[in-house]
Amino acid sequence: MPHALVIGAGIGGIATSLRLRSKGYDVTVLESNSYPGGKLHAIEKDGYRFDLGPSLFTMPHLVTELFELYQVDSQKYFQFKKKEIVCNYFWQDGQKFSITSDSEKFIKEAALYFNEPQQKIRSYLRRNQKKYDLTAELFLENSLHKLSTYLTKQTIKSILQIGKLNINDSLDSVNQKYFKNPKLVQLFNRYATYNGSSPYRTPGIMSMIPHLEMYYGTFFPKGGMHQISISLYEFAKQQGVTFKFEHPVDSITIKNKIALGAVCNNDFHEADVVVSNMDIFPTYKKLMKDEPHPKKTLEQERSSSALIFYWGISKEFPELDLHNILFTESYPKEFNALFEKKNLYKDPTVYINITSKEETNDAPKGHENWFVMINAPGNYGQDWELLKKEARKNIISKINKILKTNIEEFITTEQILDPVGIENNTSSYRGALYGASSNSKFAAFIRHANFSKSIKNLYFCGGSVHPGGGIPLCLLSAKIVSDLVPIPTQNA
């Protein structure tokens, strides 16, 4: 049986292993860490369970279809439920607004709360859906780097309606055109952070991101976000995929412009297909040192990173739900600090994720497990010890002001993850959460392809390559790779 080698057991790597296994490949996954999942990892500390990485789950069909490839009911391995409240938003003047999963209810409540016409909000959401429908096949579901992608009827239709995509406008300018209330503009500007970008620079086409959240909904996986990667990992093992942990790859073996396998711990692992789920930057710089590097792609501006405080809280806050946002007074200044000054803003937007709202066992009775995150620049050699101290003080000050509490007296345990730790744990260059940023209308086209144009049998998946970062896009990258890899022949 022909053999496929996957480098990295992140969500994209696990999904790729399942897809290639279903095509008839014998698959081995080499992972440098002692656990699967990459950023989708978790810890238990002092009676609290914390998801360490991604906290938002949408488009669950991209997970369940991996089980369906084998005609298996996904519910035997993986369960989830839809959230009625998508997110709670708080402002420093005491105002609070909750987005509901019912789009019509959201339109009516938002129109009343923000004093905006219902039809204006409805028109905005429909326009976002139109953008998604026009571009999903081109930008998300197929390789941008194959000529055949541009010859489909859907792509031609998208090109003919390019004016509706707001490619030449920023997300902020699109939102400003629709809405007068600065709070509603800020709410929709936040979606730029879903791909680690700035709403003042990322193109207006990104307004389709709230459509994905509002159309598909947000969900909570039973057992927490970590259960996504764990369930797929366990399922992949049952399907015959081999995982080798604490097996950092030293190099990809290439001869006569053909990928032949990889060297790991001085052992050569031969393969007919090699897929790197490692960040594209170290894939070239570390694993393919002697090969020509795509300079323009590797020099792309990186996405934002994160500074996360994992707090055990000895109190329950009924005004909070699973997802909560405490907004800054000045979004422009915050994003200027992140992307121009490579610094943390003194008044950061604070995201609080509390899985114990759904899984009571994630915290002791009467307690909550807080995942407290602020957007951060990538690791450019800043003094992170100083930045973490200042950020902790600023975060606590904001929480105390908005929630009218003294949160520090309720913190029973603490762990901190900064961009340096993210980079060290996941090999994400500069600790970027989404690979390259989308702060340019050309970003999607410069992002690395899912295959090598010069090396046969070499492919790429994960958040640093097309179509981008985040769980749904990583899963789509695995599908694109699977579609590109040929069906094996028994004598291959």
Image (tube, rainbow, N blue to C red):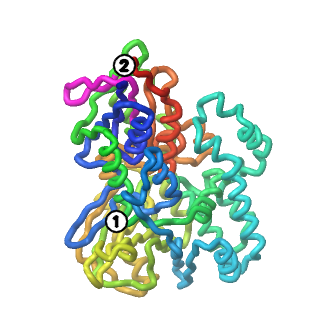
Figure check: 248 above or below 85:
above
Q: Secondary structure at mark 2?
A: strand
The quadrant where residue 26 appears: top left
Residue corresponding to mark 2: 254
Q: Are marks 2 and 1 in contact (CB under 8 Å)?
A: no
The three-letter code of the residue at mark 2 reads: Ile
Q: Position of residue 28 (x, y in %)?
A: 31, 34
For the point 34% across and 24% down, which residue is it?
A: 271
**Magenta part, dominant SS:** strand
For the point 75% across and 63% down, which residue is it?
A: 177
Please state if 53 lies on the left or on the right of 324 as rendered: left
The quadrant where residue 159 appears: top right
The three-letter code of the residue at mark 1 reads: Gly
The magenta span reads 261-276
Residue corresponding to mark 1: 223
Looking at the rendered image, the quarter that the N terminus falls into is: top left
